Image (tube, rainbow, N blue to C red):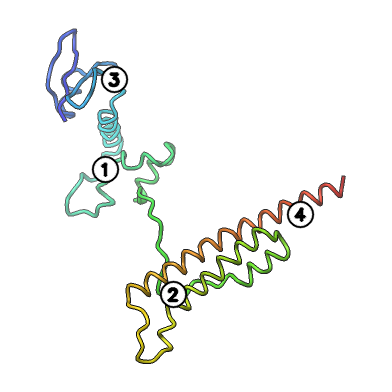
Amino acid sequence: MRYFAMIDGERKGPFTLDELHEAGVRPDTYVWCKEMDEWEKAEDVAEICRFYRQRIFDLMHPSASPADDSLPEETQRGEEDYEDFPLRFRHFARQAGADPVIREEEPDYDRRPSSLVPLAVMLMLFCNTITGLVALYYAIRSRKAWNEAHRSDQQHNKALYSDSERQALSREAHEYARMARMWCGITFFLGFFLMALVSSHLLN
């Protein structure tokens, strides 16, 4: 991206990001490029801010090795990749090589999900009947989906499902198990809250 700048009342440029400082561009200097609708102060342009933030970081940490294609991706990340981290922790996260991309870990669909039926029954009896029933419903659906996916294992020489169908049923079982866990948690905390409320009322 190349920018024009209003310097001493004259439009000058275009400049690359590296050239802006040498050209006399300051945070309150108005700049423009073809991607922008109108002129803006340099400090309000995200790309320019990221560039100078990285440049300041490099100046403050001269021992940091320059980016090299042969290095792992984690060591080549710029500070702008860590914008989702709180400001006070960005430096430590970058130095530690923390992955700025939050990835949700996928469950192992080849492993049977935990049976939550007993837990759901207990929570339904001792915490909250309505939400406990919801948790029990999902726990039973999870068990049924898993058993159905692997029913062909006990039927010799009879392939009831293709590999893709079995995988889909296994995924369904894990999804139902996830919902059961969520509703078990809701039931527990709701029961705990109601118990605390009743205890407080009795004490008063």
Marks 3 and 4, the one that precedes in the sequence: 3
Q: Is residue 166 left or right of residue 48?
A: right
What is the spatial separation of the Cα atoms under label 3 and label 2, in whole angstroms? Answer: 56 Å
Q: Which quadrant of the structure image shows residue 108?
A: bottom left
Q: Which residue is mark 1?
A: 63
In the rendering, which numbered label is found on residue 27?
A: 3
Structural crowding at the residue carrying mark 2, measured as other residues with C-alpha within 10 Å and reported as few (<14), some (14–19) or many (≥20):
few
Return the disc, 3 or 2, that comes first in the chain's sequence: 3
Crowdedness near tag 1: few (<14), some (14–19) or many (≥20) residues, C-alpha within 10 Å: few
Q: Position of residue 60 (x, y in %)?
A: 30, 35
Sequence order check, earlier mark of 1 and 4: 1
Type of residue at label 2? Arg
Percent of width and height locating residue 91: 37, 41
CA distance separating discs 1 and 3: 27 Å
Q: Nearer the viewer, mark 3 or mark 4?
A: 4
Quadrant of residue 117 within the rendered picture: bottom right
At x 51%, y 70%, the residue is 142
Under circle 2, the secondary element is loop
User: Which numbered tag is attached to residue 195?
Assistant: 4
Numbered disc 3: secondary structure: loop
- Mark found first going from the N terminus, 1 or 2: 1
Kindly give the residue lying farthest to the top in the view shown.
9
Give the quarter of the figure containing the N terminus: top left
Q: Amino acid at mark 3?
A: Pro
- Residue type indicated by callout 1: Ser
Residue situated in front as seen by the camera: 25 or 103: 103
Count the numbered circles shown: 4
- Name the residue that disc number 2 marks: 111
Which residue: 40% across, 44% down? Answer: 92
